[in-house]
Amino acid sequence: MSELTDKLNAAGNKIAGNVKEAIGKATHDEKLVAEGEAQQLKGTAQDVKGSVKGALGDKI
């Protein structure tokens, strides 16, 4: 995947995770809150991956 693809996927996961977390908190569903937090972390990791790809360019 390219840097842009990683960053777009990261943004999607962060948004979806935030929504899941908010719904989980509103409905007192701890499992959904945890899933949302995990998805946000996945998005953060993808964002870092994209940044590293951007910094290294074609070297990888």
Image (tube, helix red, strand yellow):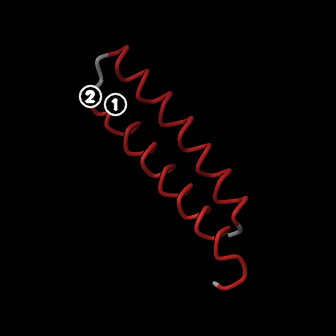
Please state which of residues 34 and 45 is positioned toward the viewer in this rendering. 45
Question: Residue 8's x, y, as percent?
Answer: 68, 50
**Disc 2 marks which residue?**
30
Is 56 placed left or right of 14 in the picture? right
- The residue that mark 1 highlights is 33
In the rendered image, the vertical position of residue 16 relative to residue 29, given as above or below = below
With respect to residue 3, does 8 lie above or below? above
Q: What residue type is labelled 1?
A: Val
How crowded pointer 1 is (Cα within 10 Å; few <14, some 14-19, many 20+) is rated as many
Q: In this view, does 2 lie to the left or right of 45?
A: right
User: Residue 43: x percent and y percent?
Assistant: 51, 49
Q: Looking at the rendering, in which quadrant would you find the C terminus?
A: bottom right
Q: Residue furthest front?
A: 55
Residue 31 relative to residue 58: left or right: left
* Disc 2 and disc 1 in contact, CB within 8 angstroms: yes
Q: In which quarter of the image is residue 16?
A: top right
